Structure formats: C-alpha cells, structure tokens
Amino acid sequence: MEPKSARTPKVNSIGLAHADYKGRPSTLCQGCGHNSIANQIIQVAYELSIRPQEMLKLSGIGCSSKSPAYFLGQSFGFNSLHGRMPSLATGALMANHHMHAIGVSGDGDTASIGMGQFKHMLRRNIHMVYIVENNGVYGLTKGQFSATADEGQRLKYAGVNRFPPIDICMEAILSGCGFVARSFSGDAGQVRELLKAALSHRGTAVLDIISPCVAFNNDDTSTKSYSYGKEHEVPLHAIDFVPKAEEIQIEAYEPGEMRVVEMHDGSLIQLRKLEADYDPTDRMGAMHRLQWAQEQQEFITGLVYYDPDRQSLAEESNLVDAPLASLTEEKIRPSAEALDSIMAGLM
Amino acid sequence: MVSGVAERVTEAAGLQTRQDGEAVNDFSIVVATANGTGSQTSNMTILRSLFKMGIPVNGKNIFPSNIQGLPTWYQIRASKDGYVARRHTSEILVAFNPVTVNEDVANLPPGGMCLYNSDWRSMPQRDDVTFYGVPVNEFVRDTGMKGKLKDYISNMVYVGALAQLLDIPLNQLEEALSFLFKGKQKVVESNMAVVRAAHAWTAENITKVDPFRVEPMDATDGLIMMTGNEAAALGAVFGGVTVASWYPITPSTSLIDSLNGYLPQLRRDPETGEATYAVIQAEDELSAIGMLIGAGFAGARAMTATSGPGISLMSEFAGLGYFAEVPAVIWDIQRVGPSTGMPTRTGQGDILFTYYLGHGDTKNVILLPSSLKECFEFGYKAFDLADTLQTPVFVLSDLDLGMNNWMSEPFEYPTEPIKRGKVLTAEEVAEKGFARYKDIDGDGIPYRTLPGNENPLAAYFARGTGHNENAVYSERPEDWESNMKRLVRKFDTARHLVPGPAIDEAQDAPFGIIAFGTTAPAIEEARERLAEAGVETSFMRLRALPTNGEIADFIRRHPHSYVVELNRDGQLHTILQSELPELATRLISLAHLDGMPLTARWIVEAIAAHEQQMAQSSAGE
C-alpha cells in the first residue's frame, strides 16, 4: 500500500483535479448565495471535464459580477462594465467562436442598467451560459431595491417597493431565448443539472437563480430569502442531464411521467415530471405558467422553456473554422493585385 | 518688419475678392435641388465627366438631415490649378429648386450664370447675371415617365443643358453614366435620351453669352476618385479587420456600408465561401464599442465607425479599453455638435473630448487623416497601433472627407507586415512567465495573452477595477499609482509610434500655420494667395495625437503660429497649449464653425485681421 502522502488526487477524464477548477478565495459575505453558485460551477466543470483553456468567464458590475474570480482560475475572464457584459461577450465570442463562456450577472446588472443589452444578446443568440444571481437588492451600495424586488416588499434601507417586479425568465422568453431556467442557490443539485444542460445549449442559456443576499434581503418575509426559498420552491420537474457520451439509463416510470429532451449536441435532458402537463417546449405555456406564478407569488424552478433549434450568432455568420482572432496575415490581408484592381476600377 | 507682413497679408485678402479673370476650367457650380429627387446621380455625372476630361475637381454635398423634400445643394469646383477646397461663391447656379431660388440667385457673384426651369411662373431678376431658361417639363413629358422617375429624369435635363453650355462632350457624359450605373445599358440609355434632348434643345435655342467653359486637360491622369469613408473601409479590409460592430449614424454609415461592400469580395475563403470577418449591427453605440472591447480582448482586429453623439455614448467603454488595455479602432466621422447638432454638416469639434474620453485620468491616441490616402493608410495602421499599444485608437475624420468625392493618387499597398504587438504564445509563457500588466521592456507596454492560449498560466482576469501587475484586484495605493504611471509611460511611447506631423516650412516665415484634417486644402490655397502677395508661410499638419518634439520644435521656430480648425473654441489650440505650456503664448487660435468646409478666403482674412491687430498694437507701444 502506498503511503498516504503519495496518493494521487482524484482526477477527471482530462486529468484535472477538483482543485484545478477553483478560483481565488471569495470576498463576498459568508453565506452569500453567489458563493454556492460558484461552487456548483467548479463542480460541474470538474464533472464534465471542461478544459479551462476553452472557457471564458465574463461579468458586469456588482456582487455577482465579482464571483468569476472565485472559480476556474485557469480560465480567461473579463469583469467588464455595469450592464454591458452581453456586448463584451458578443465581441469576444465572435473573435473566438471556439470558446465556451459563462457570464455571471445580477438582477441590477441585468434587469436595470443592462436590460437593453440582455435582450439584444438573446435576440442574437450568443453561445454562452448567462447566469443571473438574483437577490432583489443592490448589495454593494447597501440595500436599494432592484427591479426584480416584489411589489409592496419592505426593506430597512429602501422602505416599501412601489413597483411591480421584472421577471427575468419572461423577458428572456420574449426576446427569443431558447434555454430559460429558474433555480435556487439553496438547491445545489438542481443548479448543477441545469448548469450542465445549459453548457450544452447552442445559444444563450439563461439561468435565473434566486441567490439570497444574507446582508440586505434575507428576511423571512422576502421571497428572495433562504427560508422562503426552502419552504416555497415548487420544482416543475426533477431534472437530470446526460452528456452525449454516456449511455442512457432510463428508469422505469409510469407513462407520461418522464420527458426526455434531446439537445443539439446529442446530450439529453431527462425531466421527471412532478407537475403534470408542464411542457417546457411550449412557449405560450411557459409564459402562461410564469405569469401565473408571478401572480400567486409562487416560486417555480426548473427548465422553464427549451428550444434547441435556433442557430447561434457564430453559427449563422458563416465564419471560417479557425477563430477570427487566430487568422494570419495571408488570410486577413488581401493581395497587392486585389488592391491594384480596385484602384483601376476607381479611375 | 511686422507691419510689412500685415500690409502684404491684407493685400492678399483684398486680392481674393476681385472677380476671377479666367473662366476656363476655373469656376464653381452649385446645383440647387430638393432632397430625394435623384439629383445625386446627375451631379456625379457632371463631376465624373469633368474628372475624366482631366480637369481637377471636387464635389461637396451640402445636404439636409431629411429623406425627401428639403433643399439640398451640390457644389462642384473645377480648378485648373488643382485647388479642391470649397470656395466662398459659385459662379454657376443650376436653379432647380423653386423653394430656394431667390436666395440662390442672390448668392451669385456679379457676372454669374444661372440655368433654371423656364416652366416656373416667376424668377428673381438680376441685371449682372446671365439667365438661361430650359423647359424641363417638356422633356420629361416626352419620355412618358411617371412618378418618382419623372423627378430623376428632370434632373438629367440640367446635365444635358449644362454640358452644352460648358462644352462637356456627350460621350464623356455617357461614359460617366455607364460608370455610375455599372454598365447597365438600359438605364444609361434612358438617362442619355433626356441628356441628348436637353443638349440639342440648348444648342438650338440658347445663345451663350457667359464666359464659362471647360477644355480637356491631363491633370487627372492615373488618379482615382472616391469618398473618404470608402477609402477608410478599404484600408480596414487591408488592415485585417476581423470584427466590426456599429450603430447607424450620419455621416459614418457609409463607411460600414462600404466595408459590407468590400469584405464579401475580398475576405471570404475562395474555396468554402466562409468569412474571415464578422460585421454586427449593434442596438446602440454602447453595445457597438462593447463588442469591440470584447473582440479586442479575445484577439480580433476590431473596429467601429460613429460620429459625435456615438462618441459621447462610447466614453464608458473607452475608459475601460484604456484602463484594461484592450486594442480597438474607433472611426469618428465628425459632424457638427453639441448634442444632435447638424447631422449632415461638417466640423472638427470632437478632438478635445475624444483625446480625454473617459472619466478619471484618461488619454487616447488619435489619428487625424486629411486625405483619401491617409484614410486608407490609417485604415490599416490604426489596427497596428491599437495592437502595438494595447489601447483604443480613435481616427477623427469628418463629413467633408468621409462623404464627399475626392481625387487621389492610387493607394499604395502596405509595405510592412501586420503588427500584432506583444502577444505571448503558450511556449513563450512557459519560458518567460507572464504578468499581464508588468512593464518588462520599460516602454510601458506590457505583454498579453489571448483566450485559447493552452498554457494554464496564460489566463488572467481583465477588469476595469484597480489591479496589480498580475491583473488581480487591488486597492493598494502603490499598485494604483505605479499602474497609472506606467500608462503615462505607454502614452509617451505612443508619441513616437504615431505618424508625425507633415511639415512644409518656408525660410524665415513670419508665422506658421497649424491644422489637422480637412482644413488642409483651404490652407494650402490660402498659403498660395499669401505667397502671391509676398508672404511665404510654414505649415504643419498634425497627423496624430499625442504630440511629440517635432511639433514643439516647429512652434519654437516661428514667432507665432495660427492654429486653424473647424470648431468654436479652438480645441486643438487648447490641447497644444496644455501639452506645451512653455509655448502657449506663441499659439493663436483661428477657429470657425458654421457647418461648412473652410475656405481659403476665410483663412486669409482671419490672418490679415490678426496681423493688422498685432501691427497696430506694436506700433502703439
């Protein structure tokens, strides 16, 4: 038996250990939902054997947007401007369409200052996972309401919120997004399965994750608190992601109890239906369900809407195979003869 | 001595108000029409015909911010001496817009000529102008055309009549139309039918008494003609643009249109047809520049084109690009501000704002093209500079250069290979290590890596927040200060990498003239006027900011220098004074902005006024 110290750590199929996916220590509050999400990203990247060199981490501004520093330390990242991560991501992923990307935003970053860019990113269908760490409150500026806060909610700093909330999932579906999910940072298992499926989606996958702010919005009365989430979460279905390489083992379910959705890359999403009749591929049904949930203040989670058919921006741009950023001079500078012929045509 | 200069400059100012003696190949035409009636084709036909007759020409479109109906003017200057600046007056008026005809006729100089539509019920009268009426409706009726086509065709009437009056051969017009309609014979023929009819009618019914006419020359042999925006787009294509993102705004839109025209021809894989580029129309300018910064970070040659209001919106990302050190190229085709201002008029009012664009301590590299050749050259060099310096590079053109047609020598193919700057490969990271913001070479320019680099040590987290040499978040005072000081070192390096000034210096010149961009043609003409009166001047045209020693030396060699520019506040003057405080008192601002390109006449008069004032104050001492 080998001595304990020489034992090699557990590694994934590309030889990386769990620790290779970690980032710098978090500077967010202890117990912040965002830390839990960062940990799930680390776990998922490890489990899926993602090559860190192929992953980009992008964010805007706010507590949420700091968190890409706390996962995948071997991946390139860009902590950009408030509400402007979508445009930055668009440019980066056109310059190098071989990269995968995880964007981390917050409810202020997405639903207020960044609403325009968020919706236009979805129209263009950029190939990235876009996580909204949604806590209904501005943390770094100490407790103002965000646009996702409930109408009538009371906060110590901000008083009573007089305006109706913006529902990020509804906005995403309206803008043409083909992968819309809602989850709860306290439901680690669901977050992981949704993340895995999102990483296989060909366009933008929006994950609206309720992620409680322990400092400013974790009162039992808040729908964005841990206690509320734990007590009221209504999963639409139990979700399992099956990567394309794995053999599928479908357990025996009653007819109609299991829904398997095939993704563009051959991966499968298994949905064990907890809520009868919910069909995540029905756009109108999804919108209806979200509106009903909003009216009833019901906290539904799961894959709310899925449409694998839309091409991503890079796919429909008919790009050469090599990343544009990597093209050498002979590919990107036309010949002297070409210039001469243009000049002759202008005489 | 000073008073002698003042007298001679004043004499030059007086000389230019006299009537031009010659009327062969030396006059201006102004065509007054309504916007959206297709007069552009007619005007381009005249312009191109003169150009192909070998006569130096320039056309300026003085158009409204409107799709249809508002008055528009097109000025064509023919100049045997090769002057291409706008002139104060035009001797020939094509009065085809009843709404503006009173004003247009009043603007003619004595001895001028007016071609008008004789179907109109009334025309303003002037004894010192020659009027020729042409029955436009008759020609249009004969073609049997209806609706919008009627407008287009009626504008061909003045082409035929003017050609007859000025001696422009019909075959020259036909060739021009064939060029403009890309050889579509049917369209050429239907236009030529009207041109010929008007030409014949004029020959038969009008007795020419004015002196204006053209004669073939050989002064345009081997020259090309195009707009600055087209030249800029072509430069970008040869500079290896890979990502372009933009939001439509006059007068920059035609730059991207042109990019969209050239790229599919020149930058697709010949076998697969796949593109080596992506052009994305953004939802606004915030997003347009955001895409550039993302693309530049990931290693693209990224560009946009915009105008003043877009520059305002881009200030946020410009600051990020400066601070996170991301290459990007931003063309600003300047129009008249502040605010929405005059979208279809020209100016140079963005230079001060752009130079410092971004909050906090920000300074940007700016290129200042003044000709088609420089639009092309800076079109590719801007990418090399942005990649070399790892910073956004702004190129300030303007509406006059960008949208009007200019003559030029054909462009020269880039002589140097594409420069990608200090980008480390995976192997180089393994050999040398990597700290994103460390000044290894002492020039302030750090090394960078690109996403996709296989070395696990190559990755870094770019940010707009305070950072140390390893791109890690830092609020340490010494990290902040040393990083900002390195950025100053980098800017000092830029001083010697940007194109230097173009200097044409006279021995013992009593003063220098400093300018940038499209004021140059008017300045060159003004200098010849001054030289005719015995005042030899020096001219320094800035081709970029920041400034360097060459610029300071020029100012030092002259008792005083006029800084001529198309804005209200003398913005370049302000920049030069603040960059070179020890020379500030030698700089005199001659700034002017009314939306129109500068004229030689304004420059000579402004200098004369100043020289007189100085002579008087020194005499009074």
Image (spheres, grey):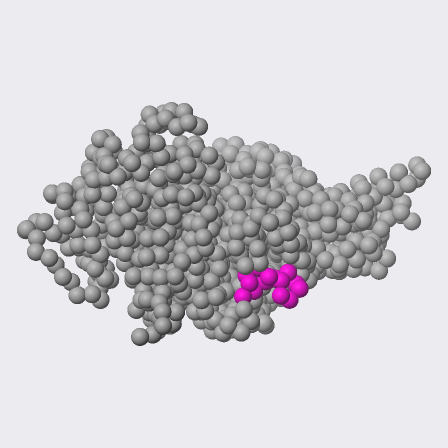
Based on the displayed image, in which of its 4 quarters is residue B416 positioned? bottom right
Residue at the image position 36 percent from the left and 60 percent from the top = A100
A309 or B551: nearer the viewer: A309
* Residue A48 to residue B413: above or below: above
Does the rendering let one see residue B334? no
Segment colored magenta: B434-447
B577 or A7: nearer the viewer: A7
**x, y percentage for residue B577?**
75, 46
How many labels sit on residues? 0
Residue A15: within the magenta? no
**x, y percentage for residue A28?**
44, 45
Magenta-colored segment: predominant secondary structure: loop
Residue at the image position 41 percent from the left and 34 percent from the top = A216
Residue B441: within the magenta? yes
Residue at the image position 35 percent from the left and 56 percent from the top = A42
B490 or B89: nearer the viewer: B490
